[in-house]
């Protein structure tokens, strides 16, 4: 592929943060602030712990996504960079789930299903 | 007037596009790879915290031990510092040298405030008997938060060095790529704190 062809091919994805994203930056700041206040408020409520935990994890992941997409500019990068950043996460999650299952079973004295392997 | 004393440089041209990573430079891709590996380290620590906590019915409610309003203010400052970082990058993209230095130093100031807050928090908790060897909660708490604090300290040094470079007329070339990479590290520090604050401080 020639250099010219590469440049033409990449053109639709070249929305780098060079453009004026100031409005987005301030908007995300207010969203992050509002979600943080909401989180702190929820932590003082007397709702069921499991519900609070689920809500808080969802809020935290939303905030982290906003930072990644807008402040770290993943939204404006090529898909391959997005994959580079997010592809290892499900693998880590897979590892975490099995490690936690193993740990909880050990804590309860239950042999893990794959113990005989 | 020397070139160095001018406040505004010509806007830096964007780097050439690559078929795989677009306009992302090797430096930026390298920083992303580093951040992913660093995220795995934080993930391992948070996972250990989760397992120890889930296996201990006597685990105290964090809100009863830790000062949530104080830490919420520290969180707020870190979020503000992320905003100042992107504003600094915006100035760097426009070629505004002094504007970039101003926002980078403001960002570093936010980091220094956070570190001072962490020292104050540690002193208070240790005075209350919440020491590293006094249980799994304090042990995991100090390991996770101090590991994050080390990242904040590194970030502050990185920001000050970048600001110094920009002040000397460097780092604005190639689409202010150097400043953007510095920003990636700083936003990662903020992103991790968002998760640590929720998982360690807030979840009941």
Image (cartoon, helix red, strand yellow):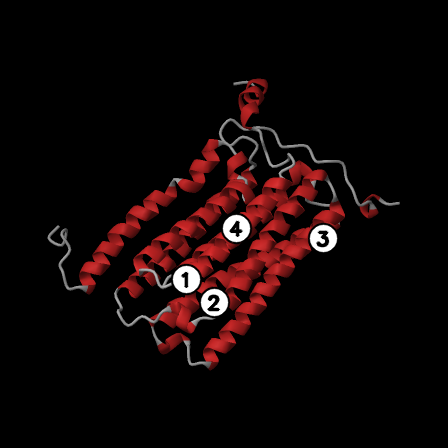
Q: Which chain carries label 3?
A: B
Marked residue nearer the N-terminal end (4 or 1): 4
Give the SS element for disc 1. Answer: helix
Marked residue nearer the N-terminal end (2 or 3): 2
* Residue B197 visible in the shown view: no
Taking the image as shown, residue B8 lies to the left or right of residue B140, namely: right
Residue A77: x, y in percent? 52, 34
Q: Which mark is residue B72?
A: none
> Does B198 appear above or below A92?
below
State which mark lies toward you, 1 or 2.
1
Q: In which quarter of the image is residue A5?
A: top right
Q: How crowded is mark 2: few (under 14 residues within 10 Å), some or many (20 or more)?
A: some
Q: Which mark is residue A43?
A: 1
- Residue that badge 2 annotates: B68
State which mark lies toward you, 3 or 1.
1
Q: Are marks 1 and 2 on the same chain?
A: no
Residue drawn at 68 percent across, 39 percent down: B93
Q: Which chain carries label 4?
A: A
- Residue that badge 4 annotates: A32
Residue drawn at 49 percent across, 73 percent down: B122
Give the SS element for disc 4. Answer: helix
């Amino acid at each position: 592929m020639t250099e010219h062809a590469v440049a033409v091919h990449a053109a639709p994805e070249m929305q780098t943060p060079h453009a004026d994203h100031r409005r987005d930056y301030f908007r995300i700041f207010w969203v992050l602030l509002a979600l943080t206040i909401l989180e702190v408020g929820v932590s003082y409520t007397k709702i069921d712990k499991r519900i609070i935990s689920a809500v808080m994890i969802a809020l935290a992941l939303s905030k982290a996504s906003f930072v990644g997409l807008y402040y770290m500019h993943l939204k404006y990068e090529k898909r391959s960079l997005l994959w580079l950043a997010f592809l290892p996460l499900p693998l880590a999650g897979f590892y975490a789930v099995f490690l936690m299952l193993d740990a909880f079973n050990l804590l309860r004295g239950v042999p893990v299903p794959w113990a005989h392997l | 007037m020397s070139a160095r004393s001018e406040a505004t440089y010509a806007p830096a041209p964007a780097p050439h596009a690559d078929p795989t990573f677009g306009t992302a430079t090797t430096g930026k891709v390298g920083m992303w790879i580093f951040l992913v590996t660093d995220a795995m380290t934080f993930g391992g620590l948070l996972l250990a915290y989760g397992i120890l906590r889930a296996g201990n019915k006597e685990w105290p409610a964090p809100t009863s031990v830790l000062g949530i309003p104080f830490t919420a203010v520290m969180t707020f400052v870190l979020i503000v510092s992320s905003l100042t970082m992107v504003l600094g990058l915006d100035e760097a993209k426009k070629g505004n040298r002094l504007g970039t230095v101003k926002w980078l130093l403001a960002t570093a100031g936010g980091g220094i405030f956070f570190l001072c807050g962490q020292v104050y928090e540690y002193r208070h908790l240790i005075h209350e008997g919440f020491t590293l060897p006094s249980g799994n909660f304090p042990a995991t708490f100090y390991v996770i938060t101090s590991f994050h604090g080390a990242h904040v300290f590194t970030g502050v040094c990185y920001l000050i060095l970048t600001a110094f470079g920009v002040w000397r007329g460097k780092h604005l070339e190639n689409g202010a790529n150097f400043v953007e990479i510095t920003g990636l590290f700083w936003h990662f520090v903020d992103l991790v704190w968002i998760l640590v604050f929720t998982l360690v401080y807030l979840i009941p």
